[in-house]
Structures are given as C-alpha cells and as structure tokens.
Image (tube, helix red, strand yellow):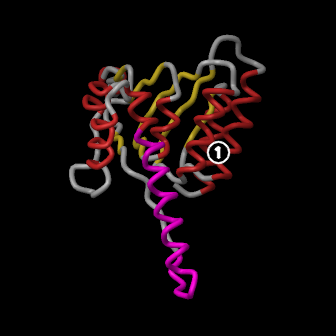
Amino acid sequence: MDTAHQETLRDFYLAQKCCFLGEVTESSAQQLIADMARLSMDVVDHIDLVISSPGGDTDAGLMLTEFIDHELGKPVHARTWGKCNSSATFVLLCCKKRVAAPLTRFVIHRQTTSLELQYDATFPERLDAWKKEQALLLDRLTHFYATKLNISPEVAAELMERGSYGINDTLSTEEALRIGLVTEVQDMTSYRISSD
C-alpha cells in the first residue's frame, strides 16, 4: 500500500473516530501515536484501531507497543482485515480486544535485518557486535510473544520459526484465534451482499 492510499485510509478511519495502522515505519508509528493521543482526549473508555498491515520496521512496532502498554492510559480495541504481519502483530497483541475479519492472514516471524558488508580491519568486530545485537533482539521478541500469548518461550520460538522461511508461514483466523493472537473472528454473515 503506497503512502497516498495509507493516508486515505487514515483519514477515512479518523472520520469514524478510529485510528489506522498500515505499513509500520518510524514515520507511521509516530503518526499513529499522535492520532491515538488526540483521540484519547475525545473518547471515554477505549481507542479503536484498525490494522491492515504488511508489517514493517521492528523498532517502530516495538515503540508502538511501549506507547500502548505504558503511556496511552486507555485500552485499545483492534479490528484486522487483509494482512496483519510481522511488527503489526506486536501492536495487535497490545490491544485488549482483537477482532479479525474472516479472511485476515497473519505472519509471526523472527526479525529480518540487513548488514552493510564493508570489509576492513574492523569488520570482524562489527560482525560480532551485530550478532550479539540480533541475539538480544531475538530473545526480546521471543519473550514478547511468549508473554503476550501466554505460551512457553519454546512454543513462541517455534511459532516464529514457522513464519521465517516463507513456507506455510501464514496463520488463518482460526489458527490466530486458537493461539490467542485474536480474541474473536467476525461472523461471515456480516460480509453478505444484500439482494436488494
């Protein structure tokens, strides 16, 4: 989804007093934080968030979780449609109520990273530092999923491995409901086309 489409959806949902999360970038995360803060002044009991996201930046997703869990001060209720992948699942798991449209697909995986390969005298040292940083992030994500899904770290690691290789990586709404990623799946009858 390009920036123009994402902005159109953001405006559409804000008009309905909801927030929207598309691709997770540092910029979109900061915008969502501002939107939630603004809406929190208007609503009494909770913030509504709509998620349709291919995922994105790990750090931006984790920043959103910290804001929702520790700063917002109001529960968030999420609805998903289309995709809720990668770092978008972090945000979803910070929401109290998590409703999925029937055909939503989810991906949970280990972090993906890049490493600039410029070989010089400091390369081995930089590579070792990068490996340590990635191991710490993997531990953090494993702990996050284990805690939020109330599963063991071993089961969380298996779930993340499943989504890391692109083979049978998506979770259906039924699987997402079974593992606790969502709390409810919308009824298909709400998607019927009227015969009028």
Q: Is residue 156 left or right of residue 130?
A: left
Q: Which residues are magenta?
A: 116-142
Which residue: 70% across, 27% down? 71
Which sits in the foreground, 78 or 82?
A: 78
**Amino acid type, residue under disc 1 in the picture:** Ala
Q: Label 1, on which residue?
A: 29
Identify the residue at horizontal 33%, vertical 45% (top origin).
160
Residue 38, compared with residue 44, is above or below; it is below
**Magenta highlight on residue 138:** yes
- Residue 75 lies left or right of residue 43; in this view the side is left
Residue drawn at (47%, 63%) of the image: 113
| Residue 10 location, quadrant | top right
Q: Position of residue 69 (x, y in %)?
A: 61, 27
Residue 94: x, y in percent? 52, 28
Residue sitting farthest toward the top: 45
Tell me if mark 1 has few (under 14), some (14-19) or many (20+) residues whose alpha carbon lies within 10 angstroms of its own.
Answer: many
In the image, residue 22 sits, relative to residue 119, either above or below, namely above
> What SS does tag 1 mark?
helix
Q: Check residue 97 for magenta coloring.
A: no
Side of 93 where 60 appears, left or right: right
- Of residue 109 and residue 131, the one placed in the foreground of this image is 131
Note whether residue 196 is visible: no
Residue displayed at 63% across by 36% down: 12
Quadrant where the C terminus lies? top left
| Residue 137 percent location from the top left of the image | 49, 50
Up-down: is 183 above or below 32?
A: above
- Identify the image quadrant of residue 34: top right
Q: Position of residue 111 (x, y in %)?
A: 43, 54
